[in-house]
Each structure stands twice: as structure tokens, then as C-alpha cells.
Image (tube, rainbow, N blue to C red):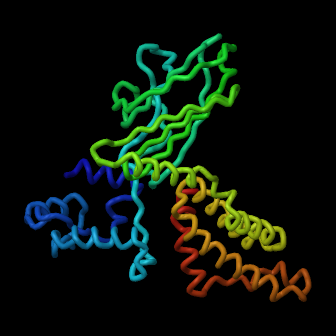
Amino acid sequence: MGKPISKALMDAKVSAHDITQVVLVGGSCKMPVVQQYLQHLLGREDIVALEPDYMIALGCGISAGIKERNEEIKDMLLTDICPFSLGTGIVNHNNKDKDLMSFIIERNSPLPITRERSYQTVYDNQKQICFKIYQGEGMYAEENILLGETELEVPPKPAGEVKFLVRFTYDINGILEVEVKVSATGETKRLVIVNKELGMTQSQVEEKLREFERLKVNPSENEENRYVLEWGQRLFMQSSNEQVRYDILKKLQYFEYVMAKDVYQVPKVRKYTTVFFAYIEKMLNRYVSFSDDVLADGSWYQEDDEDEKEIDNLFHEWDEKDK
């Protein structure tokens, strides 16, 4: 029990002292020895199993309600994550017999997700390249599970001149789409890997692949997101107060961070970012007829309203990571 708990804390980047509440799930949690061991591991006495069996049903109900967009739990957010890393093998110059693992989708990434990385040829006049797709956490490719492979013809050129863009798109249904594009020729090869144990039909797979196309659009190209980014940049230029500019910059950086890392969080973060920008604009406009000295004072910048407190809480975690 200790190892999975330690791994979970490590992946979440929190310590046992940061945990505010422990929810026990499953019938075995009714055993006193399990509760006592958890108290020992986490250093707390308030661990009690109330209805661990009921918690399973409750979790399933909440999950189903979120997926159905049920109005009663519309403000709750449940994010599926990738439980393992996905990547491809690359040449190990120190040992040509053992390819290294190049991770493209890291474990604990929110799903569905699309990620891409750039690669290049390693030999002069190389005519062919093979991308082997692996699942696992091992440093060497052979230590992980081989899911599939795809080969492409390469125009013979000096090493490093031919580049490839490899994109992985993956969702909770176990569908992994691999796209490899040769920059020199524009040729694109596609490989679809499906978890057959889920029993999905071909039409269901094709429907999911069509949904993948929406993920491949960069969130920064979305009209609403561009508007928020441009709004923040305009407010930054209008303001002459150092603290206000700093906070605007932080909000913009966090919004860009979320767009790059978790597309499903974008609408929520966009909402709170616009609330913050609306507050800043309102304050700037209030003093628009005053002198530059009044504007530069910054004494008006008070975030004591409930909305501003919620904004601060939202960005606190990211600010801590950024330090």
C-alpha cells in the first residue's frame, strides 16, 4: 500500500501534510488494520471508513453525470488522465543495440490529449526510418510494451537535414492515433492503435478519430481565446502600475500554459481570466479623467471582492509552481 500512495503523492507533487481529507473506497477499507496503516503512513488520526462501498457508486454516478452535462453537477470537473507514458524509440549513440525511450505523452496527462515532437535522421543518406511506438516508463525502449510501428521512405540527405513531426493523439477509450510527417516531402503516414479489449466497432473508432481532429486545433487559434489574449495585452499597455502589470502578465501566462497543457480546462480558466480583465478595465476606466499621477498611484487596486478572491485561488497553484 505504501508504494502506490507514495507514487500518487509524487505524481501529484504534494506531500502527505497537504492532504485535507481522505476518502476510503472499497470494502477492504472497513478493516481496522487498513485504517491503522493509513494513519501511520499519512500521519493523521482522522481516517474513518464511513461507507466505502457506497463511495464507488457515488463516484460512478458523479462521473456519469459530468459526462452527460447534468445541470445538478455542472460546476464539477472530472478529468481523465493517462495512467502510463507513450512514446517512441530513438537511437542511443552510446549503445546502438538499446534504443532510448522518447516520451511524447507523459503519464498523468489529462485526456483526451494531442502532443507532437520533432525528430531527424541520424545517418547520412538514410533512405528509410521506422518509428516504433511504446507504452511504459522505462528509460530504454525495449523495457516498455511495443504497441506498433510505422515505416517511411526518406529522401537521402546528410544526417540531420530530414526532419519529422510526430503527433500522438490519445483518449480514454484506448485509441492512439500516430501521425508522422516528413518535412522535406510533406508525406504523412498514419497509424491507429486500438485497445481491442474494449470491443469498439469500426464505426465507433472512426467517430472517435473524427473527434480527434478538433483536438489538433491549437486553442490559441480559437476566436474567443485570441480575444482574451489581445484584451490582456491591451490592458497591460494601458496600465502604468507595476503590480497591475505583473498580475495581468501572470494571468496571460497561466492562460497560455493551460491552452498548451489541458484543453479541457481552457473554458473555465478563460471565464475567470475575463472576470479579472473586466475588473481591471473597469478600474482603469473609472480613473480615465484623472491625472497621470492618480493613475500611477495604484491605491485603487484592491482585490477584496469574492470574485477576485476566487481568481487568486485559481492561480495560486500555478504561481507556486512557477517560483
> Is residue 170 shown above or below 272?
above
- The answer to whether residue 108 is visible is no
Instruction: Say which quarter of the image contains residue 226.
Output: bottom right
Picture residue at 78% right of the left edge, 68% below the top: 236
Q: In the displayed structure, does residue 67 sit left or right of residue 123?
A: left
Q: In the image, residue 297 lies at what x, y percent?
A: 81, 81
Q: In the image, residue 323 lies at what x, y percent?
A: 58, 57
Query: How many numbered markers are drawn?
Result: 0
> Is residue 299 shown above or below 247?
below
> Is residue 212 shown above or below 32?
above
* Residue found farthest to the top: 125
Picture residue at 43% right of the left edge, 51% below the top: 171
> Is residue 194 shown above or below 141?
below
Q: In the displayed structure, does residue 131 sit left or right of residue 250?
A: left
Q: In the image, residue 80 lies at what x, y percent?
A: 39, 58
Q: In the image, residue 177 lies at what x, y percent?
A: 48, 41
